[in-house]
Amino acid sequence: MPKTHRAVRRQGFTLVEILVVVIILGIIASVVIAQFSTSGADARRSSVAGQLQTTRQILQVYRADHSDIFPDLVADQWAQMLGTTDIFGNLNPTGAYGPYLPKIPRNPLNNNTNVVADIGSADINTGWVYEKTTGTLTATNQTPTLIYDEGTQVLQ
């Protein structure tokens, strides 16, 4: 009687097949990680843009309430925006105006709240640069001696 060969069933994967799958998964993972690595920077840029827009609008409301005068954020470090004031902007617990902000705004780029009058007086604790006469509020970048450029949205 002749010997018959039984068909041998393969059980499992070969090493080459496993390596191909691992390489494909590695390529997919590198693409996904590359896309998510910039998401943190994108979130900070969006957050600072929203923070600036909201705070600038609130500064305009303060100005309208106080006879066309902006608050002195540099001297008072947000106190006029957090408390109640009289028509002249003096802090007054029974004042008719305010509070305008529920809490001090934190710069999303560097997590600081301090306000300075010009970039030349900025340090590692500076979050905002504010020009009182015009009410211009800008954010410092991740490097405190640089203004965040809203046009290019470059983080430095």
Image: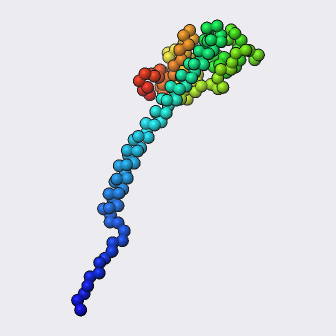
Residue in the foreground of this view, choosing between 29 and 50 = 50
Q: From the viewer's perspective, is residue 90 above or below residue 12?
A: above
Q: Residue 24: horizontal and vertical position, in percent?
A: 34, 53
Q: Residue 85's quadrant in the figure? A: top right
Answer yes or no: is residue 49 visible: yes
| Quarter of the N terminus within the rendering | bottom left
Q: From the viewer's perspective, is residue 31 above or below residue 122?
A: below
State the scheme by which the image is colored: rainbow
Q: Residue 96: horizontal and vertical position, in percent?
A: 73, 14
Point out the residue furthest to the bottom here. 1
- The residue that appears at 64% across and 23% down in the rendered structure is 101
- The residue that appears at 32% across and 57% down in the rendered structure is 20
Please give left or right for residue 5 compared with residue 22 in the image.
left
Answer yes or no: is residue 127 visible: no
- The residue that appears at 33% across and 74% down in the rendered structure is 9
Q: Residue 13: horizontal and vertical position, in percent?
A: 35, 66
Please give left or right for residue 150 compared with residue 102 in the image.
left
| Quarter of the C terminus within the rendering | top left
Say how many tags the image has.
0
Residue in the foreground of this view, choosing between 104 and 99 = 99
Point out the residue furthest to the right here. 94
Point out the residue furthest to the left here. 2
Please give left or right for residue 27 compared with residue 93 in the image.
left
- The residue that appears at 56% across and 9% down in the rendered structure is 133
Q: Residue 125: horizontal and vertical position, in percent?
A: 56, 24
Residue in the foreground of this view, choosing between 123 and 73 = 73
